[in-house]
Amino acid sequence: MKLTKKGLITYVNESLTQTDKSEIETIVRKEIKAALEDAKFKNKVKDVVSSEHKSKDFEDKMVTLSKNVLVQLYKQLYNKRGFWTSGLSNNAN
Protein backbone atom coordinates (compact mmCIF):
# COMPACT_ATOMS: atom_id res chain seq x y z
CA MET A 1 0.00 0.00 0.00
CA LYS A 2 1.46 3.33 -1.08
CA LEU A 3 0.57 6.40 0.94
CA THR A 4 0.80 9.86 -0.53
CA LYS A 5 1.80 12.82 1.59
CA LYS A 6 -1.82 13.96 1.81
CA GLY A 7 -2.98 10.46 2.68
CA LEU A 8 -0.34 10.10 5.36
CA ILE A 9 -1.30 13.42 6.94
CA THR A 10 -4.96 12.39 6.90
CA TYR A 11 -4.06 9.02 8.46
CA VAL A 12 -1.99 10.65 11.21
CA ASN A 13 -4.69 13.23 11.93
CA GLU A 14 -7.34 10.52 12.20
CA SER A 15 -5.10 8.42 14.44
CA LEU A 16 -4.54 11.19 16.97
CA THR A 17 -7.10 11.81 19.65
CA GLN A 18 -7.99 15.28 20.87
CA THR A 19 -5.91 14.67 24.00
CA ASP A 20 -2.90 13.73 21.87
CA LYS A 21 -3.31 16.88 19.81
CA SER A 22 -3.54 19.01 22.97
CA GLU A 23 -0.40 17.41 24.41
CA ILE A 24 1.52 17.96 21.17
CA GLU A 25 0.37 21.57 21.04
CA THR A 26 1.50 22.14 24.63
CA ILE A 27 4.91 20.59 23.96
CA VAL A 28 5.39 22.65 20.81
CA ARG A 29 4.43 25.87 22.58
CA LYS A 30 6.94 25.17 25.37
CA GLU A 31 9.70 24.40 22.85
CA ILE A 32 9.01 27.56 20.86
CA LYS A 33 8.94 29.67 24.03
CA ALA A 34 12.23 28.17 25.20
CA ALA A 35 13.83 28.76 21.79
CA LEU A 36 12.67 32.39 21.70
CA GLU A 37 14.04 33.05 25.17
CA ASP A 38 17.43 31.53 24.32
CA ALA A 39 20.23 34.12 24.33
CA LYS A 40 21.86 32.59 21.23
CA PHE A 41 18.62 33.02 19.28
CA LYS A 42 18.20 36.61 20.45
CA ASN A 43 21.78 37.44 19.47
CA LYS A 44 21.30 35.87 16.03
CA VAL A 45 18.18 37.93 15.44
CA LYS A 46 19.97 41.09 16.61
CA ASP A 47 22.86 40.41 14.26
CA VAL A 48 20.61 39.83 11.28
CA VAL A 49 18.52 42.92 11.96
CA SER A 50 21.52 45.17 12.54
CA SER A 51 23.23 43.94 9.37
CA GLU A 52 20.06 44.59 7.38
CA HIS A 53 19.72 48.10 8.82
CA LYS A 54 23.20 48.96 7.65
CA SER A 55 22.54 47.98 4.03
CA LYS A 56 22.17 50.64 1.35
CA ASP A 57 18.99 49.00 0.05
CA PHE A 58 17.31 49.35 3.46
CA GLU A 59 18.37 52.97 3.73
CA ASP A 60 16.97 53.73 0.26
CA LYS A 61 13.68 52.09 1.14
CA MET A 62 13.42 54.06 4.38
CA VAL A 63 14.08 57.34 2.55
CA THR A 64 11.43 56.49 -0.03
CA LEU A 65 8.95 55.50 2.67
CA SER A 66 9.60 58.71 4.64
CA LYS A 67 9.12 60.83 1.53
CA ASN A 68 5.85 59.08 0.74
CA VAL A 69 4.57 59.55 4.29
CA LEU A 70 5.37 63.27 4.27
CA VAL A 71 3.82 63.79 0.83
CA GLN A 72 0.63 62.03 1.94
CA LEU A 73 0.56 64.05 5.18
CA TYR A 74 0.83 67.37 3.36
CA LYS A 75 -1.77 66.31 0.81
CA GLN A 76 -4.19 65.46 3.60
CA LEU A 77 -3.46 68.69 5.45
CA TYR A 78 -4.02 70.68 2.26
CA ASN A 79 -7.23 68.86 1.36
CA LYS A 80 -8.63 69.20 4.88
CA ARG A 81 -7.36 72.75 5.48
CA GLY A 82 -10.89 74.09 5.95
CA PHE A 83 -11.24 71.84 8.99
CA TRP A 84 -8.11 72.93 10.86
CA THR A 85 -7.39 76.46 9.62
CA SER A 86 -10.41 77.93 11.38
CA GLY A 87 -8.87 76.91 14.71
CA LEU A 88 -5.69 78.92 14.07
CA SER A 89 -5.41 82.50 15.19
CA ASN A 90 -2.67 85.10 15.57
CA ASN A 91 -3.87 86.24 18.99
CA ALA A 92 -1.88 85.61 22.15
CA ASN A 93 -3.65 83.27 24.58
Image (tube, rainbow, N blue to C red):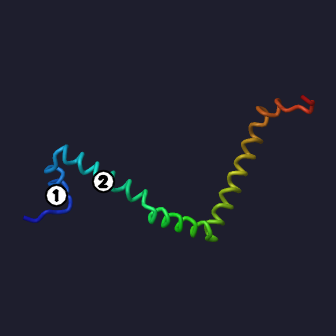
Q: Which residue is mark 2?
A: 28
From the viewer's perspective, tell me whether residue 46 is left or right of residue 57: left
Q: In the image, what residue type sits under mark 2?
A: Val
**In this rendering, is residue 74 above or below 46?**
above
Q: Quadrant of residue 8?
A: bottom left
Answer with mark 2 or mark 1, whichever residue precedes in sequence: 1
Tell us which disc is closer to us: 2 or 1: 2
> Horizontal and vertical percent for residue 66?
69, 56
**In this rendering, is residue 78 above or below 52?**
above
Residue drawn at x 61%, y 71% as measured from the top left: 55
From the viewer's perspective, tell me whether residue 72 is left or right of residue 5: right
On residue 7, which mark appears?
Answer: 1
> Horizontal and vertical percent for residue 16?
16, 49
Residue drawn at x 46%, y 62% as measured from the top left: 39
Label 2 to label 1: alpha-carbon separation: 23 Å
Give the position of the N terminus as an image quadrant. bottom left
> Within 10 angstroms of label 2, few (less than 14), some, or many (20 or more) residues?
few
User: What SS does tag 2 mark?
Assistant: helix
The front one of 55 and 2 is 55
> Within 10 angstroms of label 1, few (less than 14), some, or many (20 or more) residues?
few
From the viewer's perspective, tell me whether residue 61 is left or right of residue 79: left
Residue drawn at x 15%, y 49% as measured from the top left: 14
